[in-house]
Amino acid sequence: MQEREDLQPPVNSNVSPLKRFKLDVPDANLIIRSSDFVDFRVHKSLLAMVSPFFKDLLSLPQPSDSEPVDGLPVVQLSEDAELLRILVSMLYPVYPVRPNSYHKVLYLLAACQKYDMVQVQSSIRAEVNRGNFPAPVGTEAFRAYAIASSKGLVPETEDAARRTLDYPMTFESLGEGLRSFEGWALRDLAHFRKRCADNLVTCLESFLQVCAPGPSNIWVGCPGDTPKSSSRRYMPQGDTLPNWLRQIIAE
């Protein structure tokens, strides 16, 4: 894979391995061009094998106004060079380039979904599960939810929604991620969090109904509370629900 050197920054110690990645592909017969005009040389047969989208696209006659490079046809894509480097590295038998953030993982998954690269998408999810690719950390879950929902990534949307439950849905928690939200996604996340809270209260509702004489079926007095001088079982009067739990449920 050859890249246009005039568009690449000079290599130095501050440049990430992602920027320095190159892969020589002998006998390449197709160029895919990124949105920022970086060319990647690949094999038509490989793209057709991993992607029904490209299989159909490459079976069509190429537009006459498509200007070849070194005699190779060029396919313009909407993804940037950084994303295409990662994607191309996963198509060939080399160690894949690691995205440096979970947000880029999501955009990579979205590209695979767009081009119908089912197996590649599964491999990316497996890398995330193994810890080889980044996963959302802390309040990053809010932005991850915004991106995943907008791209139609169902598993990632559900995972991110669950992760947000550890944090309040405030401007401080949302941060810059608020800019990534579409209105419907923000509404759906708020509804999801409310359903979770309602379900929790429903599950614990019976804990509040412990006014009958005698110990609760769940919360009982400690064995040490039973007077040794009495053969009658100790029967505490009134509510036996711990105050800390009652306060949590009441909030």
Image (cartoon, rainbow, N blue to C red):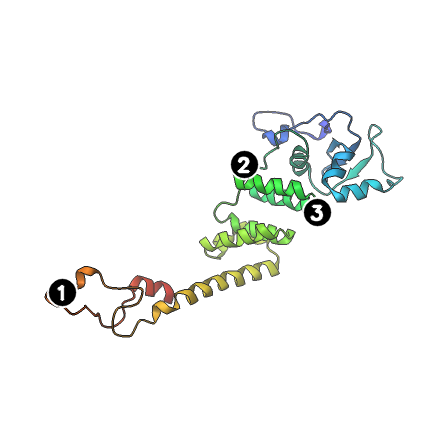
The amino acid type found where label 3 is placed reads Lys
Q: Residue at x 62, y 43 (%)?
A: 122
Q: Residue at x 66, y 32 (%)?
A: 89
The amino acid type found where label 2 is placed reads Asn
Q: Which mark is residue 133?
A: none
Residue indicated by mark 3: 114
State the CA–CA distance, disc 2 to disc 1: 60 Å
Element on which disc 3 rests = helix
- Badge 2 or badge 1: first in the primary sequence: 2
In the image shown, does 84 or 241 lie closer to the viewer? Answer: 241
State the CA–CA distance, disc 3 to disc 2: 23 Å
- Give the residue at the far left of this rendering: 229
Q: Which mark is residue 132?
A: 2
Residue 201 spot, x, y in % from top left: 42, 66
Q: Residue at x 42, y 65 (%)?
A: 203
The answer to whether marks 1 and 3 mark residues whose Cβ atoms lie closer than 8 Å is no
Residue indicated by mark 1: 227
Q: Residue at x 37, y 69 (%)?
A: 206
Residue 222 spot, x, y in % from top left: 22, 60
Q: Nearer the viewer, mark 1 or mark 3?
A: 1
